[in-house]
Every structure is written in structure tokens, then in C-alpha cells.
Image (cartoon, rainbow, N blue to C red):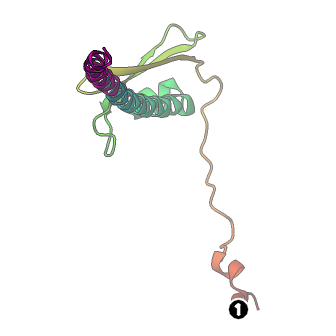
Amino acid sequence: MMHRALTTRRGIALFEVILAAILLGIGLSIALSLAAQSLSQQSLGERNMVAAWLADEQMGLVVMEGPQQFLRTHPTSGTYLPPFEEYSYEVEVQHVSDWEPYLVTVFITWDDGDRSFLLETKIAPRQGDPEEFDDRRPLEFIDREAIYYEENLE
């Protein structure tokens, strides 16, 4: 009677080992799948962050120069230079009236237009007289090296 119980037990142990191996394989495949997906999402997040920086740069140019001056002096669409050559931009400036703010929209696209980032804001028109750029050169020559080297100071 004791002999019969041992043979039955051996079959159950083999079944438990096979079941444990299957469960371990499923667990490892899920873990590897999640790791690959997280790497993909991290790469997408990095590209979105770069697109946000580039859009902020374009928007900063519009704010700094004013919408009217920006339209006269800068292209409203194009591609970036390396290392950002896969990104392209388009700036739209909508003018409602003289006393209403401009609606400025910056589109950044990459992956051949499959992915995009949009930044939109309102910018007030510049009021008052146009700025005159003064000549900011110093009146006297400044020897900058003499300031740092003692032998030139004596």
C-alpha cells in the first residue's frame, strides 16, 4: 500500500514542475513585453520633449520680435538643421484686428508627419513708436586683457 502512494506522488511532482515552468515562461514573457513597451514610450516621450523645446523656441522668436516683425523677417515654415533634421515647423499668425491679440500657432512635426506637437497662444501687438537701435559700442577702447594680467597693469 505504501508503494502505490509513492508512484502516484512522483507523477504529481512532475506535473507541478511542468506547470511551474509554464507559469515562469508566461511571467518572463510578460516582463520582457513590458520592458520593450516602456522603452518605446520613453523614446516617444523624448521626441515629444524635443518637439516642445523647438516649439517654445519658435514661439519665443515671435514674442521677442513681435508678430508683425516676425512675419517680415523669418520664414513661417521649414525644417531644422542637424541634429534636429527630422523635425519640421510651421508658424501661423492670425491677425483679428489692430487692438486684438494675435493668435499664434506653432506646429512641429516629425516621423514624416505621422507625429506632431502643437503650441498655441495669444500675443498682444506691439504698441507705440518703433524701437530705434542705438549704437552700443563703448566710447573708449577697453583693453580687456590688461584687466586680467598684472604685468600689464603696472
Point out the residue furthest to the front here: 1
- Is 109 on the left-hand or right-hand side of 49? left
x and y, in percent, of residue 42 in the image: 41, 31
Is residue 16 or residue 5 the one in the foreground? 5
- Is 133 on the left-hand or right-hand side of 61? right
**Count of residue discs:** 1
Q: Is residue 51 above or below residue 115?
A: below
Instruction: Please tell me which residue is depicted at 50% across the width and 7% down the height of the picture.
Output: 96
Give the dominant element type of the magenta stretch: helix, strand or loop.
helix
Q: Is residue 59 above or below residue 137?
A: above
* Quarter containing the C terminus: bottom right
Instruction: Please tell me which residue is depicted at 50% across the width and 28% down the height of the picture.
Output: 59
Instruction: Please tell me which residue is depicted at 73% across the width and 87% down the height of the picture.
Output: 150
x and y, in percent, of residue 130 in the image: 60, 32
Give the residue number, with chain letter if any, for mark 1: 151
Q: Is residue 74 magenta?
A: no
Point out the residue furthest to the left here: 112
